[in-house]
Image: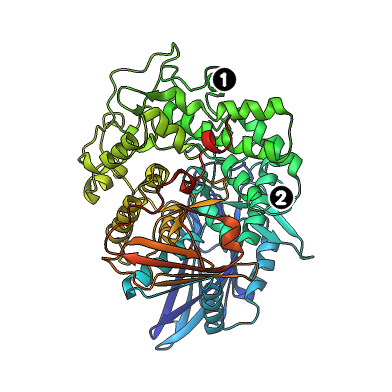
């Protein structure tokens, strides 16, 4: 909550620092006797109560020789201003190369709390703060050590790992007695307990939060407790908090984030409130923020889908995500031994994805309230019934039941052919819904891997689905293609939306050789490792070593694999097996082993196989 700046000035009678408190309502005050500037900004993009303020305190280590404020474009001698857009200009007489330091802290609670937060810096020098920051990041990033790659691959890997850990952000502070408190962007009160914010769950449920559960469960425990606080303070779990509820994207994927954590042992104290909040979200939509809760729940709960023709946009995407979210709730209801009627209800709703499957195209398709598919239908049309993607992208959003999707398509061979087709269909598109080419479309076109649009999130698990149809070598091939072609260590190193760590966490998981296709299960679906060796240090003190000594750009296929010395043929790894530590040895080959991972018992979890009767 605090930082230090270092300014190096030339010889000058008037060396300036400008402090801009932004527009949309701000306050500034210069306190010369303390070499201090305080203020607040209320600038925001929505999702906050009327009393929202970001307070700041700045102290310099050199007295001011120049002290002016500005308000709405005019420079003033008054040392205090409140207006739409204010700021301060302070100056010093400096010698050549003179260094001036500024200590800065912010708070969402008060000036007094900002001053408390400033104490985080202690009496450390700039170089000490720098060294501590570097040490803190190295401690976090050292949890995974990779070896046997190129310098560029190391840079890409650790850049992605770093980016994975920037969100969500701490929104809580420590009061004068050391207690954890937070300003609630949901009701405007200062309340006890954790709160994290700034994460879009539509993106991050996919693998960012599973990454936290695997590697940083104690931090995610705080995040989960914060989610309980959001429900208590607003009546809903967040879907895209920034910092309060914001109208963005679709789905009810807070269910995935809460249930996946619980099933992997990251358990909140107030389980009753957790479950109550999940159920509430299936039967309500936020009164002012339609992306929170479930827009169209009345239709979905009655018909089993959100219709195309009832003026609810992106209806097919909502249906598919609600069905997966219902499966998550089913898993928790079963775990908590809820009444059978309740468990059966969510088990039934988890199969609602079937209602949108079009046998003719073998793709998901919007459906009208009368039960007829919408027409005309173009699988290449972005948006409309889908969210930032088309039917080729969203058809695979059956995370919890790939075998059910395989059955709908007509078997494994047809399913694999459809997966292959994503890469075979040229990167053509219909952008008419948006009235222009959105950047996600352009990124797919530029990356030129057919209609595979890795630059956005809906399709990022798709390649791993070859494992469910007994052709894991195709996943191994395409995953390496994506890692090689769509990620670099350069400034343009992402092929599209990074989005709160999701696209980064995909690379980290995929580099290790596995990925959480279905959060809420205890399985990670296999790809193949990128490095010759990876050492994973878990919070529980155990260590997992992944060896693949023959790994190279040519040797991208798994020939054989052992887990703690025993031959391992499955296309997935269990969470407990990873957390228990040990050693995975993989023999890599230039040619695919088309015998390994082809039997049904090797396939990862599918609801209709493993549980649904």
Counting the numbered discs, the total is: 2
In the image, 31: left or right of 410?
right
Q: Which element carries disc 2, helix, strand or loop?
A: loop
Residue in front for this viewpoint, 571 or 444: 571
Q: Do the residues labelled 2 and 1 touch (CB within 8 Å)?
A: no
Q: Position of residue 569 (x, y in %)?
A: 45, 56
In the image, 70: left or right of 451?
right
Q: Position of residue 486 (x, y in %)?
A: 30, 57
* Separation (CA) of disc 2 from disc 1: 30 Å
Residue depicted at 47% across the width and 28% down the height: 353
User: Neighbour class for label 1 at 10 Å: few (<14), some, many (≥20)?
Assistant: some
Q: Which residue lies furthest to the right in this view?
A: 177
Q: Where is residue 278 in the image (x, y as percent from the top left)?
A: 65, 36
Residue depicted at 66% across the width and 40% down the height: 332
Which residue is identified by label 1?
298
Whether residue 80 is visible, yes or no, is no
Residue in front for this viewpoint, 533 or 571: 571
Which residue is identified by label 2?
268
Q: Position of residue 231 (x, y in %)?
A: 68, 40
Q: Residue furthest top?
A: 370
User: Neighbour class for label 2 at 10 Å: few (<14), some, many (≥20)?
Assistant: many
Q: In this view, does 99 lie above or below 229?
A: below
Which is more N-terminal, label 1 or label 2? 2
Image mark for residue 601: none
Quadrant including the C terminus = top right
Q: In this view, does 477 lie above or below 428?
A: below
């Amino acid at each position: 909550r605090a930082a230090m700046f270092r300014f190096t000035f030339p010889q000058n009678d008037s060396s300036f620092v400008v402090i801009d408190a932004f527009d949309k309502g701000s306050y500034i005050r210069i306190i010369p006797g303390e070499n201090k500037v305080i203020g607040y900004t209320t600038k925001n993009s929505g999702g906050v109560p009327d009393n929202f303020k970001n307070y700041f305190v700045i102290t310099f280590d050199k007295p001011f020789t120049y002290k002016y404020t500005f308000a709405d474009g005019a420079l003033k001698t008054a040392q205090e201003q409140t207006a739409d857009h204010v700021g301060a200009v302070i100056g010093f007489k400096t010698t050549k190369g003179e260094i001036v330091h500024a200590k800065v802290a912010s708070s969402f609670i008060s000036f007094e709390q900002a001053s408390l937060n400033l104490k985080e810096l202690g009496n450390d020098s700039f170089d000490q703060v720098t060294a501590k920051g570097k040490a803190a990041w190295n401690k976090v990033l050292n949890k995974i050590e990779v070896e046997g790659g190129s310098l560029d691959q190391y840079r890409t890997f650790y850049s992605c790992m770093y980016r994975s850990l920037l969100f969500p952000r701490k929104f809580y502070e420590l009061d004068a007695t050391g207690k954890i408190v937070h300003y609630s962007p949901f009701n405007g009160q200062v309340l006890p307990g954790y709160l994290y914010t700034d994460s879009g769950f539509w993106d991050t449920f996919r693998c960012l939060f599973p990454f936290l559960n695997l590697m940083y469960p104690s931090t995610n425990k705080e995040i989960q407790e914060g989610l309980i606080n959001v429900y208590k303070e607003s009546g809903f779990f967040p879907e895209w908090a920034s910092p309060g509820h914001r109208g963005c994207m679709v789905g009810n994927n807070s269910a995935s984030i809460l249930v996946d954590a619980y099933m992997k042992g990251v358990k909140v104290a107030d389980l009753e409130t957790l479950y109550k909040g999940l159920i509430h979200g299936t039967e309500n939509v936020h009164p002012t923020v339609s992306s929170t809760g479930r827009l169209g729940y009345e239709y979905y709960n009655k018909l089993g889908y959100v219709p195309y023709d009832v003026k609810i946009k992106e209806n097919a995407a909502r249906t598919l995500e609600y069905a997966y979210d219902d499966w998550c709730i089913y898993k928790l209801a079963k775990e908590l031994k809820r009444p059978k009627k309740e468990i059966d209800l969510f088990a039934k709703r988890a199969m609602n994805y079937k209602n949108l499957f079009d046998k003719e195209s073998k793709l998901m398709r919007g459906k009208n309230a009368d039960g007829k598919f919408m027409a005309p239908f173009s699988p290449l049309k972005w948006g409309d019934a889908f969210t930032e993607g088309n039917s080729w992208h969203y058809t695979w959003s059956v995370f919890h039941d790939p075998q059910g999707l395989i059955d709908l398509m007509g078997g494994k061979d047809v399913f694999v052919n459809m997966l292959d087709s994503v890469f075979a269909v040229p990167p053509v598109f219909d952008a008419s819904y948006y009235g222009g080419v959105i950047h996600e479309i352009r990124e797919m076109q530029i990356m030129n891997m057919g209609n595979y649009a890795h630059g956005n999130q809906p399709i990022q698990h798709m390649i791993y689905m070859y494992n469910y149809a007994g052709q894991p070598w195709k996943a191994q091939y395409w995953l390496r293609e994506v890692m090689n072609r769509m990620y670099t260590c350069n400034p343009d190193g992402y092929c599209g939306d990074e989005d709160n760590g999701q696209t980064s966490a995909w690379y980290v998981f995929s580099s290790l050789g596995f990925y959480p296709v279905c959060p809420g299960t205890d399985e990670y679906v296999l790809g193949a490792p990128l490095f010759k060796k990876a050492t994973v240090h878990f919070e529980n003190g155990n260590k997992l070593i992944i060896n693949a000594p023959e790994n190279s750009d040519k040797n991208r296929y798994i020939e054989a694999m052992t887990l703690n010395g025993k031959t391992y043929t499955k296309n997935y790894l269990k969470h407990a097996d990873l957390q228990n530590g040990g050693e995975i040895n993989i023999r890599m080959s230039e040619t695919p082993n088309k015998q390994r991972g082809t039997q049904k018992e090797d396939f990862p979890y599918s609801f209709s196989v493993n549980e649904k009767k």
